[in-house]
Amino acid sequence: MTRLVIENAAIATVDAAGTEFGSGHVVVADGRIVAVGDGVAPADEELGTRIDGTGCLVTPGLVNTHHHLYQWATRGLAQQATLFEWLVELYPVWAGVDEQVEHAAASAGLAWLARSGCTTAADHHYVYPANAGDLDAAVVDAAGRVGLRLHLVRGSMDRGESNGGLPPDEIVEDTDAALLATEHAIATYHDPEPAAMVRVAVGPCSPFSATERLMREAADLARRHCVRLHTHLAETVDEHEHCLAQFGRKPLDYADELGWLGADVWLAHGIHFDDAAVARLGATGTGIAHCPSSNARLGAGIAPVRALLDAGAPVGLGVDGAASNEFGGLGSELRQSLLLARLRGGPDALTAREALWLGTMGGARCLGRQVELGSIEVGKQADLAVWRLDGLGHAGIADPVAALVLGPQPPLALLLVGGTTVVADDHVTTVDDEALRTELITANLRLTAEAAHHWEEVG
Ligand SMILES: [Zn+2]
């Protein structure tokens, strides 16, 4: 039995009672948490490796509920665009995504997420150009390479321009082919076990890129296989108007009618909801992946996080694709979520501890992992972030949770996923930074050159 003890550290467990220890210990054995408490570990504890956490705060590993890892290869484009303008500019670039690009971008994106305290990431991939190779395999392999837990959201788009949708026809899939490929991804990769490193969810992309039939049949498919459902909803005013014009309904009413609300569903963004929609989300237990930096980058609006929490809807944090959030990290979203909530609702709209809850338990609830992830409790998976708070960036802030959330993102002394080290002394130990950088630059150059060439030919 491999055992690891972290002691002399502040601990924020994020359990239901909000238990914290000013100086406590966590004991890990065979990938799970076997003890957590005040003071040093019991003297009779059969000890393996002992880590002195003096000056550190231990939190649950952060859970990223919404990402598009392939976008790490297309950052810094369409800098002043609205969501629809940004998509129209980027779809042609994304048409060149293949398994090499996907692998490079996903590896880089996941390594960066690890550096920001993330231990579980949901990747919503919805661009499947013909002849791109096995993109799902590329993401799964990248997650294994870096060592993070992955929720592979097998996305899809089947509603191109000629059918009233936003994406060009050449990057949408045939409806039946998309459903078949989704079923194949579940059969190949979904692991329902508590310690699962890979789970699969079903994710038609958005109301403006997926047909009604795809949305309905994808929901049936997910429920037949007991996996979760994810899509983008209520991100912008443009989308709201598109739904009214195309379907005669607001986005949430449209989703409701298609069977897309429930405790097995989490929705990305959820900004433009009225009071009735917020109440409906709470009543159905539908989760929201709140992506504060991406929402700010695209000027999309501020999600009603306080109202959603008060209504009882689970809210988690998402980085979103790095093409709309070039920062790409999750730790900083704790602060960003607090700032945006307060811009909308005043200084008591979200506390530092609530922001930490969003990034941990809230995310675990969105992904259906609340029994095994999201808090530091005996029996749960040992996904732990050990933040170093003894440097200049946090000097003099007595409350460690305030230091983490309100201060700069601290360096990581350690990041454990299922008890295995992924980050030590603020460096990812599983992959080589320089190799990732080289692969990423190659992928980026290929994608942008291919796009330029293709669109020159098309005229
Ligand atoms: Zn997104």
Image: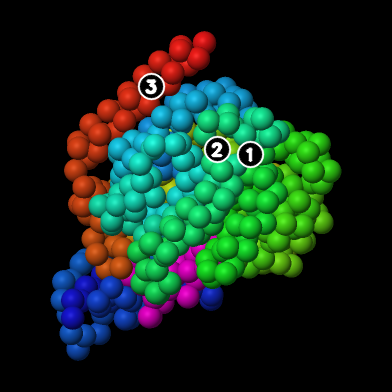
The answer to whether 266 appears left or right of 440 in the picture is right
Q: Position of residue 175 (x, y in %)?
A: 59, 47
Q: Position of residue 92 (x, y in %)?
A: 50, 25
For label 3, the SS is helix
Disc 1 to disc 2: CB gap under 8 Å: yes
Quarter of the picture holding the N terminus: bottom left
Q: Callout 1 environment at 10 Å: few (<14), some (14 to 19), or many (20+)?
A: many
Q: Residue furthest bottom?
A: 44
The answer to whether 142 appears left or right of 160 in the picture is left
The circle on residue 159 is 1
Was residue 426 drawn as part of the magenta stretch in this picture?
Answer: no
Question: Which residue shows up at 18% across the image and 76% down it?
Answer: 2
Was residue 363 drawn as part of the magenta stretch in this picture?
Answer: yes
Say which label, 1 or 2, has the lower sequence index.
Answer: 1
For label 1, the SS is loop
Frontmost residue, 219 versus 231 = 219
In front of the other: label 3 or label 2?
A: 2
For label 2, the SS is loop
Q: Is residue 252 above or below residue 219?
A: above
Residue type pointed to by label 3: Glu
Q: CA distance from mark 1 to mark 2?
A: 7 Å
Q: Is residue 150 above or below residue 340?
A: below
- The span shown in magenta is 360-383
Question: Which residue shows up at 66% across the image and 30% down it?
Answer: 162
Q: Which residue is mark 2?
A: 172
Q: Position of residue 431 (x, y in %)?
A: 21, 47
The answer to whether 311 appears left or right of 187 in the picture is right
Question: Which residue shows up at 36% across the image and 72% down it?
Answer: 195
Q: Which residue is mark 3?
A: 450
Frontmost residue, 57 versus 195 = 195
Q: CA distance from mark 3 to mark 2?
A: 18 Å
Frontmost residue, 309 versus 40 = 309
